[in-house]
Structures are given as C-alpha cells and as structure tokens.
Image (tube, rainbow, N blue to C red):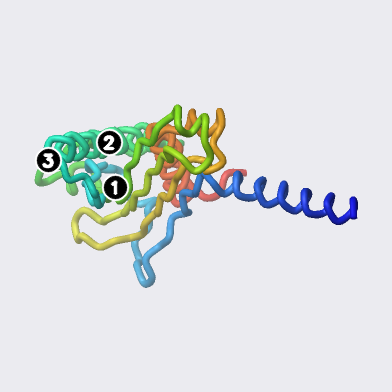
Amino acid sequence: MKSHISRSIGALALGLFVLALAACGSTSKLNRTAGTTFSLADYNTIYVADFTDKTPSKIKDEAKLATYRESVKSAGVTFADMIGTNVEKIRTPPSVLRAAPAEGTESSAGKVLRIEGEITTFERGNALAKMLLPFAGSTKFNATVRFIDQATGEKIGEIVVDKNSSPLGGGIAATQTTNKFMSGAAEKVGEQLAIARNGEPK
C-alpha cells in the first residue's frame, strides 16, 4: 500500500515538474521558407520594424480597451528595440535601422533585410495572484517574427514566440513578466540570425 502511494506521489511530482518546465513556453528556431534562395549572410543592413497589434481582446469598456491597445502598441516598439539591440551583438554585426530605409539604401548599404511581425497575445497578468494561487493571473506573450527581403518582399523565414508564466504559481511565476518574455525572445531572434549568418557557435 505504502509503495503504491509512494509511486503515485512520485508520478504526481514528476508531472508537476514537467508542467513547470513547459510552463514558460518557447521561442522556435528560425524556420526557413521552403524554396527560398536568399542567404541571411548577404544582408549588410537590418531594418527592424515596430511590431503590430494582432491581439484579440474581450474588453468591452472603450476606455480600458484603448488603454490596452496603447500598451500593446508600446510593447511592439519595445520588442523591436530589443531585437535591434540583440542584432547589434552579432559578430561582425550588420547595420541596424529602426526606421524604414530611404530609397537607394539597397545600392548604398547593400542588401536590406526587414524583420517585422505581430504580437498575437499580450497579457501582463497579476503578480500577486500568481504568487498566491496556481492557475491565476497568468502572464502571456505570443508573437510571430518574420524575416523579409526588403527589395522583393519575399519571406525568408519566421520565428514563433509562445511564452506564458508558470501555472503552478509561486515566486518564479510572480517574476515572469511580458518584458522578460520579450527580452528572452529578442535574444533568441538575435542568436538565430547570428547562426544563419555565421554558422553554429563552436
């Protein structure tokens, strides 16, 4: 009987551990578009556009909805800034633009790669609720990051961001914020671009 109880407790503990590991979601690797012939190593200039708001919302109060939309718009700028900062960390980094390149940039600065995308889920959550209760006050940040050839508009590849706080609650969940999720995702975008340009790190 004791052994059965011990196995049950062990299985429950393992399940909770696996759930906690998976709780923060993921940022995918760069998924190349099938058939594209563009090499990311050929781009001397990277234009990082502000991310747009593609989030659904159930907020009915117009004032609260306007405030929410403004917060997502601000997050779209912040996320793009974070990506630009991480691109600049690449060995032999390309030039980074945060404004749309002027006409003639292709000829004067080489090929231009545009990084753009949408925020599809943005929930700040509630730190106190996450601290005290499991499955309460969750923080979520989802986005799609696309790599586009500026001259042709052809998509070279994309990265999918799917991040959420631990449903188990507690101190770790309380510290998981949309800003932290954006920062981690932006770092992964920079790493994936670096790998595509320079190969896997040794």
Return the residue at label 2: 75
Q: Amino acid at mark 3?
A: Glu
Decide which of tag 2 and tag 1 comes sooner along the chain.
Answer: 2
Q: Which mark is residue 195?
A: none
Residue 21: percent from the left, percent from the top?
A: 61, 45
- Circle 1 sits in a helix, a strand or a loop, which is it? strand
**Eyeballing the image, is 135 above or below 54?**
above
Name the residue furthest bottom: 35
- Whole-Å distance between the Cαs marked 2 and 1? 8 Å
Circle 2/circle 1 CB separation < 8 Å: yes
Q: Residue at x 17, y 48 (%)?
A: 107
**Eyeballing the image, is 3 above or below 87?**
below
**Eyeballing the image, is 87 above or below 104?**
above
Q: Amino acid at mark 2?
A: Ala
Specify the quadrant of the image occupied by residue 77: top left
Q: Which mark is residue 119?
A: 1
Return the residue at label 3: 62
Q: Give the camera-side residue of 80 and 58.
A: 58
